[in-house]
Amino acid sequence: MQAGPRGEGRFLDQTIDRRARLMVLVAVALLATTYVLPLWNLTMFAPQYPEGLRLDIYSYTLVGGNGGQDIKEINVLNHYIGMRDLVDSEFTEFKWMPFVIGALGLFMLRAVVHGTVASLLDVTVLFTYFATFSMWSFGYKLYRYGHDLSPTAAVQVPPFMPPMFGYEQIANFEVYSYPRLASYAMAGTMVLLLAAFASTWWRYRKVAS
């Protein structure tokens, strides 16, 4: 039996089974880790910094390695090339991201309680948009930091973009940029939401056929 527009409407009104609800609950638990675990890490190595300068990016703040001293050292270096200081106030994302993550978690719990495909689809679409926009925002911020250089800086360097993922040589620095545990948790959240939706779809198709 083919599912036409009415069939699709009926599908959205279907309840999700316990397995799908459990997947969504695990997704909520993974999403909650973004409040305590870093999303991204940038590490810089140079002859004068053989042990590296490390910067962890959380959903709400920046944390430098070596007890916070690394971020101070990075800002000193940034000053010489005319780059803006890395401070929380420069990142508007820190103001809204924790609240959006919390709202998405509530929407997921709503999908578990209401138990309908429509509520599951809503939060899956919202989370997909949030994840996509967050990655774009991160890349744009890196681009602007490397291109909005002061023309009166002590050391003039060509505009550049710090790596969003992987390795790049910038002047005499080797810069590495990789996701941390919270980013993997967010990826796991996406996988679980999609798996819950797919599981419900296949169950519906099996019953309807």
Image (cartoon, rainbow, N blue to C red):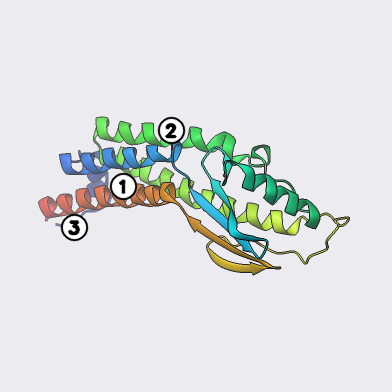
Displayed quadrant of residue 124:
top left
Mark 3 element type: loop
Tag 1 residue: 193
Tell me the kind of residue under disc 1: Leu
In the rendering, at what x and y percent does residue 172 appear? 69, 68
Could you tell whether 137 is left or right of 9 in the image? Answer: right
Q: Which residue is mark 2?
A: 102
Q: Nearer the viewer, residue 93 or 45?
A: 45
Q: Quadrant of the N terminus?
A: bottom left
Task: Tell me the residue at 58%/50% (across/down).
Answer: 137
Which comes before the other along the chain, label 1 or label 3?
3
For image coordinates 35% across by 47% down, the residue present is 189
| Secondary structure of the residue carrying numbered label 2 | helix
Q: Which amino acid type is shown beneath numbered disc 2? A: Gly
* Nearer to us: label 1 or label 2: 2
Label 1 or label 2, whichever comes before in sequence order: 2
Residue 121 coordinates in the image, percent (x, y): 33, 44
Give the x, y percent position of residue 180.
45, 52
**Is residue 53 left or right of 132 when viewed as pictured?**
right
Give the mark nearer the N terminus: 3 vs 2.
3
Report helix, strand or loop for mark 1: helix
Q: Looking at this view, is 122 or 81 the one in front?
A: 81
Point out which mark residue 2 bears. 3
106 vs 8: above or below: above
Instruction: Tell whether label 3 touches label 1 (CB within 8 Å).
Output: no
- The residue sitting at the right extreme is 152
